[in-house]
Amino acid sequence: MKTGKPVRQAVSPGETTQSVAYKEQIRVILPGGSVQQAGELTISPVNSQLPEILAGMERLAAYEISLGEQKTFDRPITLEFAIDPAKLNEKLPPTLQAQAAYWDEEGKQWVAVPATVDAARKVAVVETTHLSIWSMVLWARGYEADPTTHFLFIYDKADVLNRTSNYTGQTGNAPSSIPPYIADLMDCLEQEYAVYAQEGYPLPATPTQYMWPHKCSGAKRSLPDGERLAKPCDLG
């Protein structure tokens, strides 16, 4: 893995919060009690060509973060990525625009995990209990974003209409601005959600982002509770 010139900073055990930053682009915040033994926390920009994470998402810079032999933490640490507000999608709430992703070396793929955006501070934030190559991704501008009660549907409207040009729709309950296939998919997933809730399955407390179509390269998604919902009903 090719990396650029790193930043190294000594950290040590104790109850004091410690932080290490790389050129104000990423900050690693270690809460008290998280460091097991004295060492150097290293942040290195990754210059290698890694697969894209998901269609519709723009990856910010990637960084390899390490702390000697310590790979995991008993207490979550915080990663803060600087973001450019101009890159935020005006159609999406800032808090739903970002996802972090870490590189799974064994599986050779990105794993997406939830993140939040602090627009006032111009940072995207993620908590984790392990170190790896980490990156932050934002939904690209130009994608549509329509919410339901439990899902946020993000899609390329022109692409959806082209792929489903012969689809006439079933529910007819959605605004005309939403493609019929997406409208029915929304209805289907809410029905599936209701079934899962009735059966007592654990479900995400916050809206799950649903990307259509599922075009991805070297990535897998993880819901906040680590489980996928059932596949949506057959729309024909």
Image (cartoon, helix red, strand yellow):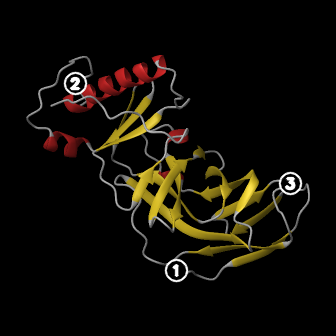
Q: Are marks 3 and 2 in contact (CB under 8 Å)?
A: no
Crowd around label 2: few <14 · some 14–19 · many ≥20 (10 Å): few
Residue 179 in view in this figure: no
Q: Nearer the viewer, mark 3 or mark 2?
A: 3
Q: Which residue is mark 2?
A: 176
User: Residue 81, percent across and down?
Assistant: 61, 58
Which amino acid, by three-letter code, is at mark 2?
Answer: Ser
Give the Cα distance between marks 3 and 2: 53 Å
Please report the residue visible at 50 percent of the width from the left and 78 percent of the height from the top: 47
Q: Which residue is mark 3?
A: 32
User: Residue 129, percent across and down?
Assistant: 68, 54
Left or right for 93, reference 4: left
Q: Which residue is mark 1?
A: 1
Which amino acid, by three-letter code, is at mark 3?
Answer: Gly
Residue 115 in view in this figure: yes
Give the Cα distance between marks 3 and 1: 31 Å
Please report the residue visible at 41 percent of the width from the left and 24 percent of the height from the top: 193
Dot placed on the residue nearer the N-terminal end, 3 or 1 = 1
